Image (spheres, rainbow, N blue to C red):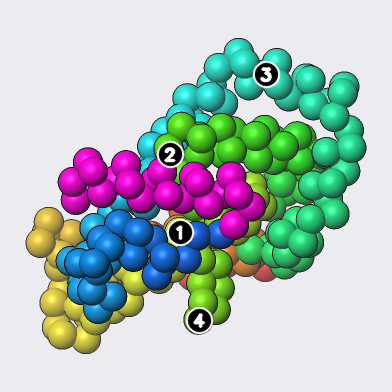
Amino acid sequence: MSSTIYSTVQAYMTTQFNNGLQPKMADIHQHVYGSQSVMDSRVQRDNIYSAIRTGRDAALAKWDEYIKSQQFSLNLEQIEFYEADKVEAQFRHRDYGRFFSELYRGTFGAQTSDLKKYRDEYAHIACCWDKKLTEFSKNGQNLVVATYGRESSWELPTYWRWAMRENALWVRSTMIIIGQLKRGVKAGLPVLPSGKLIEKAIGYAESTRALLTDGSSWTCLKCGMINASNFCSNCGAPKPT
């Protein structure tokens, strides 16, 4: 991916957002490549996706830097005292409704109690998120996610949708790892390239999944391992009753 493609993609998306539109992949493709556009070209599509990912990573890096700054604390105070209407609007957003439903289903695992306890504080952060994503976009760094359906487009996500997306990615990645390890067991491979037992690696991966998903994980009293099944994946001790 060239720097020209990156800047062209980001500038086009920013223009669309400023006009209240959601850029579609087909339109981005046509804008970037013009008469040389080939919609089925994997190289062209990969270049565009790479530009989108790079812009998202750049915006995330700026967000991480921002939340460590004094300005972040000042903005939270300003929202608390002067922008209560925007906080209330966060609770009325459809994405918050989905987030709330996922929260009380235990989807966020070990984070569930923290998210419930500090729900109002997260709404203040969500207001900062909306402001900063717009600011990043104007600087050509778009933190975007794809919408659903056949005619999918790109949008600047709410804080609630991003939280759900990230959690789903963590869980899916963990399940992929577990699946691959189990394939190794079926293939008769007792150890990983590192020399560690593959069954032990599955146990650790299952513990990670337990932390991320249903909130019903338990901690082994013998060794401290977090588990999802009825026996500890590390030492084999049974789940306390």
Q: Secondary structure at mark 3?
A: helix
Q: Secondary structure at mark 1?
A: helix
Q: CA distance from mark 2 to mark 1?
A: 24 Å
Q: Earlier in the sequence, mark 4 or mark 1?
A: 4
Res 190 → quadrant: bottom left
Seen in the image, is 232 located left or right of residue 127? left
Q: Earlier in the sequence, mark 4 or mark 3?
A: 3
Q: Nearer the viewer, mark 4 or mark 1?
A: 4
Q: Is residue 187 above or below residue 80?
A: below
Task: Residue at the far top: name it.
Answer: 70
Residue type indicated by callout 4: Arg
Per the rendered image, the range of residues in magenta is 1-21
Q: Which residue is mark 4?
A: 150
Looking at the picture, how far across and down is residue 182, in whole percent?
28, 78
Q: Earlier in the sequence, mark 3 or mark 1?
A: 3
Q: Earlier in the sequence, mark 2 or mark 1?
A: 2
Contact, CB < 8 Å: mark 4 with mark 1? no
Q: Is residue 11 magenta?
A: yes
Contact, CB < 8 Å: mark 4 with mark 3? no
Q: In the rendered structure, find residue 12 and report the number of the disc placed on it.
A: none
Looking at the picture, how far across and down is residue 138, in whole percent?
51, 35
Q: Which residue is mark 2?
A: 141
Q: In the rendered structure, find residue 170 and report the number of the disc placed on it.
A: 1
Q: Secondary structure at mark 2?
A: loop
Residue type indicated by callout 3: Ser
Q: Residue drawn at (35%, 59%), measured in percent from left and top?
A: 31
Q: Which residue is mark 3?
A: 73
Q: CA distance from mark 3 to mark 1?
A: 28 Å
